[in-house]
C-alpha cells in the first residue's frame, strides 16, 4: 500500500515512527495537497451562485487546475520516499579502501542531487496552488474566505517545509556550484511565493477582524 492510500491514523503513525520515510518531504506534500483542496473548496462554494456568474468560468478553470495539483502533490508523497531510498542506501556503502571511499563519495554526490528533485517539485506545485488561492481569496464567496486564508498558510508551510529537504541535501554536496543553483531555485520560490501566501493570509485576516 502506498503512503497516499493509507488513512490518516496510519499515515500519522508511520510519520511518528523511526522509519526513514515518510518524513518532512512527504508531510509537506500532504500539507500542500490539503491547502490546495481548501482553495478548491472556496471555488465549490462559489460556483453556481448568481452573484458570481461573471467570474464563474475563471473559478471553474482554477478549480480543475487545483484538482490536478492535489493529485500531483499526493503522488509526490510516495515519490519523495522513493527518491530518498537510493541516498539512504548510499550511506551504507563500504568505505574500507580508497577505491570504495571514492565510489561511495561519487554515489552520495549523485544521489544527493537527485534527492532534491522531488522537494523542488513539491515547491513548484505549492507555488501553482498559491497563485490559484490568490484568485479564490479575491473573487470567491466571502463566506469561505477564511478557507482561502488557511489554504494559503498551508501551502506556504508546505513550500517552506519542502525547501528544508532541498537545503539538507545541497549542504552535503561537494559541487558547490550545483548546490548553489539548486539553492537559488528554492530561494527564488520562497521569496516570491512565501511572500505572496503571506499577503493572502494578511488580507484575509484583515477582512475578518473586528476593529476594537
Image (spheres, grey):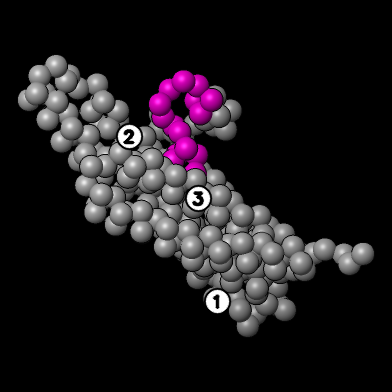
Q: Secondary structure at mark 1?
A: helix
Q: Secondary structure at mark 2?
A: helix
Per the image, is 67 magenta? no
Comparing marks 1 and 2, which lies closer to the viewer? 2
Which residue is at a point 9% across and 23% down the rendered structure image? 98
| Quadrant assignment for the C terminus | bottom right
Question: Which of the 4 quarters of the picture holds residue 99?
Answer: top left
Q: Residue furthest left?
A: 99
Q: Nearer the viewer, residue 160 or 102?
A: 102
State which tag comes first along the sequence, 3 or 1: 1
State which tag comes first along the sequence, 1 or 2: 1
Q: Nearer the viewer, residue 114 or 177?
A: 177
Q: Residue under circle 2?
A: 84
Q: Residue under circle 3?
A: 160
Please give left or right for residue 142 compared with residue 161 in the image: right
Q: CA distance from mark 1 to mark 2?
A: 40 Å
Q: Residue 12 placed where, x, y %? A: 55, 29
Q: Which residues are magenta?
A: 14-28
Comparing marks 2 and 3, which lies closer to the viewer? 3
Q: Residue furthest right?
A: 212
Q: CA distance from mark 3 to mark 1?
A: 31 Å
| Quadrant assignment for the N terminus | top left
For residue 57, which numbered disc appears in the image? Answer: 1
Q: Residue 201 placed where, x, y %? A: 66, 62
Q: Residue furthest bottom?
A: 54
Please give left or right for residue 82 compared with residue 47 in the image: left
State which tag comes first along the sequence, 2 or 3: 2
Please give left or right for residue 77 compared with residue 84 in the image: right
Q: Is residue 21 visible?
A: yes
Q: Residue 110 placed where, x, y %? A: 20, 40
Amino acid at each position: 500500500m502506498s503512503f497516499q492510500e493509507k488513512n490518516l491514523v496510519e499515515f500519522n503513525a508511520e510519520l511518528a515512527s523511526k522509519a526513514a520515510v515518510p518524513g518532512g518531504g512527504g508531510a509537506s506534500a500532504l500539507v500542500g495537497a490539503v491547502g490546495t483542496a481548501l482553495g478548491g473548496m472556496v471555488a465549490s462554494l462559489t460556483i453556481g451562485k448568481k452573484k458570481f456568474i461573471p467570474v464563474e468560468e475563471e473559478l471553474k478553470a482554477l478549480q480543475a487546475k487545483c484538482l490536478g495539483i492535489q493529485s500531483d502533490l499526493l503522488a509526490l508523497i510516495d515519490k519523495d520516499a522513493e527518491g530518498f531510498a537510493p541516498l539512504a542506501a548510499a550511506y551504507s556503502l563500504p568505505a574500507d579502501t580508497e577505491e570504495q571511499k571514492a565510489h561511495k563519495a561519487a554515489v552520495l554526490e549523485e544521489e544527493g542531487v537527485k534527492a532534491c528533485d522531488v522537494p523542488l517539485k513539491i515547491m513548484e506545485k505549492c507555488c501553482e496552488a498559491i497563485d490559484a488561492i490568490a484568485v479564490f481569496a479575491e473573487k470567491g464567496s466571502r463566506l469561505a474566505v477564511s478557507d482561502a486564508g488557511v489554504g494559503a498558510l498551508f501551502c506556504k508551510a508546505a513550500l517552506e517545509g519542502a525547501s528544508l529537504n532541498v537545503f539538507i541535501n545541497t549542504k552535503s554536496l561537494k559541487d558547490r556550484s550545483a548546490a548553489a543553483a539548486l539553492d537559488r531555485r528554492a530561494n527564488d520560490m520562497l521569496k516570491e511565493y512565501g511572500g505572496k501566501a503571506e499577503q493572502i493570509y494578511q488580507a484575509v485576516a484583515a477582512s475578518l477582524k473586528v476593529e476594537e
